[in-house]
Amino acid sequence: MSNATLTIPTQPGEGVEIDHSDSSGDDFDALSRDLVPVRSMTADDLDAIVAIDRHVTGRNRRPFYERKLAESLEQAGVRVSLVAEIDGMAAGYLMARVDYGEFGQTEPEAEIDSIGVDPAYAHKHVGTALMSQLMANLSALQVERVRTEVVWDHYALNGFLSKCGFKPAQRLVLRRTI
């Protein structure tokens, strides 16, 4: 992206240039991080995560999130799960983990396990801020790729991930019913 520069006229014919970009060149993402504060996830976030997920899915999946949060905070070698806040309230979450290899391959790769935005904060840059902060954190850890799995017909999520730069991977997932 190009640098975002704003010229503010102080007198007719004059202007002061203010550079709002950050050096990474991801002006849109950097501005999203500025608009919506994002922090590391803690054990105290469980109730908010469950509530957001219930608003989105209509189901109470507390046991699932209890396990995911415990895994994220206690078992993962590198903690990268995040919570976005607006006015001191959790507005969204992103749970991810870093894998430095599987199936005999050593590759610095991260996996997004789940992401959710409270519908009350939809279209307020919450998801973009979470994704932007995750990418900044992973870049600092020298992680080269991020992967996730989505349901094929979840069009809103697929569209969001596409806007964030995700593309279909060249992996084939195989499954067998027992």
Image (cartoon, grey):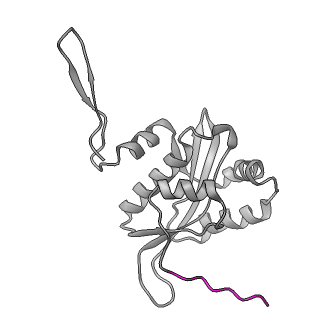
Residue 114 belongs to the span the image colors magenta:
no
- Give the residue displayed 47% in from the left and 55% down from the top: 164
Q: Quadrant of residue 20?
A: top left
Name the spot of residue 27 as percent of width and height, x first.
35, 43
Residue stretch in magenta = 171-178
Which residue is most to the left?
13
Q: Viewer-proximal residue, 4 or 68? A: 4
Which residue is most to the top?
12
Q: Viewer-proximal residue, 106 or 79? A: 106
- Which of the image's four quarters has the C terminus? bottom right
Counting the numbered discs, the total is 0
Give the left or right position of residue 3, taking residue 93 as reference. left
Name the spot of residue 97 as percent of width and height, x first.
54, 68
Q: Is residue 34 above or below residue 170?
A: above
- Give the residue displayed 71% in from the left and 67% down from the top: 67
Give the left or right position of residue 100, taking residue 23 as reference. right
Residue 175 belongs to the span the image colors magenta:
yes
Q: Is residue 13 above or below residue 47?
A: above
Give the left or right position of residue 38, taking residue 145 as reference. right
Give the left or right position of residue 85, taking residue 1 as reference. right
- Give the residue displayed 82% in from the left and 56% down from the top: 59
- Give the residue displayed 17% in from the left and 14% down from the top: 14
Q: Quadrant of residue 95?
A: bottom right
Magenta span: chief secondary structure: loop
Name the spot of residue 160 as percent of width and height, x first.
54, 53
